[in-house]
Image: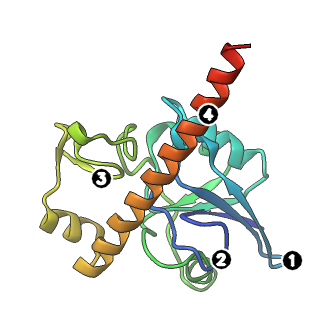
Amino acid sequence: MKICVTSQGDNLDSQVDPRFGRCQYFIIYDSETESFEAIRNSNIIAGGGAGVQSGQLVANKQVDVVLSGNIGPNAFQTLQAAGIKIITGLSSGSVQKIIEKYKTDDLEFVQSSTVDSKFGTGSIGRGGFGRKMKGGNNTPFSDSDSVQQEGLSREEEFDRLEQEAKDLEQQAKEIRRKLAELKEKLSL
């Protein structure tokens, strides 16, 4: 069985990424061989369609199940159409611990998306990167709502936000690199 876990890094010790379409990496774990492949998610900086494109990437790897924190409607439909089962609510812990939890616990597969289609895109005016919005009105959860909503302690929330800041810095570097490439191609 092939298990895909959304990850903030490229190994089994990395923390799970609570986003699907815009996660940093996909860790594809083969339970038969106990080996894994880390795939950097190039869709993280996509202007739109990150969920669908990420879903197609995972489907092309013949994955059986996806483990993530949240999944949007477009990604959900793409994965469901490919026959991939989805488990959400796994938004903290290492990839290895998430895989072990899947192997030993009786986790329930979701039957629909768990967040709006723009979850994880974020901008300063929309409540910040990777933050779920209240009632679809683009008002971010307060700190206490966020902790209650995701079941995280203040320390875990701090660590997660610190990691998101690092992720944003990495995304900005990648965008600058791509802009430089395009600029060079355009001047030829």
Q: Position of residue 44 (x, y in %)?
A: 54, 44
Q: Position of residue 15 (x, y in %)?
A: 52, 73
Q: Are marks 1 and 4 in contact (CB under 8 Å)?
A: no
Counting residues from the start of the chain, the first of labels 2 and 3 encountered is 2
Residue drawn at point x = 19 percent, y = 39 percent: 138
Nearer the observer, disc 1 or disc 2?
2
**Residue corresponding to mark 4:** 178
Q: Are marks 3 and 4 in contact (CB under 8 Å)?
A: no
> Viewer-proximal residue, 113 or 182?
182
Counting residues from the start of the chain, the first of labels 1 and 4 encountered is 1
Element type at mark 1 = loop
Nearer the observer, disc 2 or disc 4?
4
Gap between marks 2 and 4 measured at Cα: 28 Å
**Residue corresponding to mark 3:** 131
**Amino acid type for the residue under numbered disc 4:** Lys
**Amino acid type for the residue under numbered disc 3:** Arg
Residue drawn at point x = 45 percent, y = 40 percent: 73
Gap between marks 1 and 4 measured at Cα: 36 Å
**Residue corresponding to mark 1:** 33
Element type at mark 4 = helix
Q: Position of residue 102 (x, y in %)?
A: 59, 77
Element type at mark 3 = loop
**Residue corresponding to mark 2:** 12
Nearer the observer, disc 1 or disc 4?
4
In this view of the protein, can residue 178 be seen by the observer? yes
Counting residues from the start of the chain, the first of labels 3 and 1 encountered is 1
